[in-house]
Image: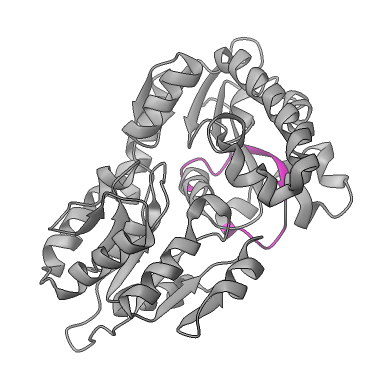
Amino acid sequence: MSRRVAIVHDWLTGMRGGEKVLDAICERYPDAALFTIVHVPGRVSPAIERLHPRTSFVQRLPFVERLYRVYLPLFPAAVEQFDLDGFDVVLSISHCAVKSVIKGAGATHVCYCLTPMRYAWDQFDAYFGPERTGRVGSAVMRGVMAHMARWDRDTAGRADRYVAISHYVAGRIRRYYNRDATVVYPPVDTAFFTPATQSNGTERYALVVSALVPYKRVDLAIEAARLAGVPLKIVGDGPDRERLQRTASSSTTFLGRRSNDEIRELYRHAAVTLLPGEEDFGIVPVEAQACGRPVVALSRGGATETVVDGRTGVLVDELSAAAFADGISRAMSASFDRTVIRRHAEQFSRERFVHQIAALVESR
């Protein structure tokens, strides 16, 4: 007899890394029930939409499509009100609150943890520092996030098993939740992201594909490209876009949201793809490498598990525009073998991910 599976995701507002994980899981479990705090219809893949996501009361609050992060203090109550009775397996995909859902009696809860809650633990200033929200707003949010951190820690036992997206995140889970985690790298669509044909050459530009939020450090990439004298193309959108556009030089082009086909072509023709922030895993560098193109990334976090310095890109030790500019120059003057880069990326395939996750879920 097949088991009833509930999948729980924090919010569905676009196809970022977490949603790409969810997409692969939804295809593996097409009869599962899907729960989420907020769902913006039309922003996610058909595989996700087919499960008709069930939302929380937060969905009905004013301007939720744009301001859902403002309602962050309500998320604990929202996820605790999901009715998960009758499900045999709960699979949460969590970077914020859904690792703390309350499962039904006799159910098993496996948490695929993208990261412990960044804003509550170690990246408060990047989101709610005085320069972001003002002195008063920052002081208020510090109290709110302190409460969220306590709740996050106190409810860590609600998951029966943690699965982390990288060894870096497994260390964070151990530090903040005092729990061990198995590592299963996220899926990258290596069947779609492929190198260009021999007749297609590269162009002399650097590429960033990212949500435009503070911790991604897109501002550093903009300054590094300027120092290196290399045009920069930025794919993505987010609350930081206006600020970034004000400070960017004329050699920086903001492309906004683009289709996967367009992003693949941009990867294929870019001289380098940049990852200036400290990522928990970082799907973008693997997509770029699947297209046979080198990456310049900060030598911290998940990039140290996905980029091989000198073989598939350049790892930069210092978080500064000057260091990244030097990394860009070194990468653009080096001779990389796109076959070697592509072969390295293939170990992060979608098929490998689905097999490993299904084995963990179905063995319980």
Task: Tell which of 261 and 209 is nearer to you.
Answer: 209
Task: Tell which of 237 and 46 is nearer to you.
Answer: 237
Up-down: is 286 above or below 270? above
**Number of marks present in the image shown:** 0
Q: Position of residue 277 (x, y in %)?
A: 42, 52
Q: Position of residue 348 (x, y in %)?
A: 28, 48
Q: Residue at x 48, y 51 (%)?
A: 17
Q: Quadrant of residue 59?
A: top right
Task: Tell which of 35 and 182 is nearer to you.
Answer: 182
**Going by the image, does 255 lie left or right of 77?**
left
Up-down: is 174 above or below 304? above
Q: Residue at x 57, y 72 (%)?
A: 247
Can residue 103 be seen in the rendering of this structure?
A: no
Q: Quadrant of the C terminus?
A: top left
**Going by the image, does 88 lie left or right of 21?**
right
What segment is highlighted magenta in the picture?
27-46
Q: Residue at x 27, y 68 (%)?
A: 328
Can residue 48 be seen in the rendering of this structure?
A: yes
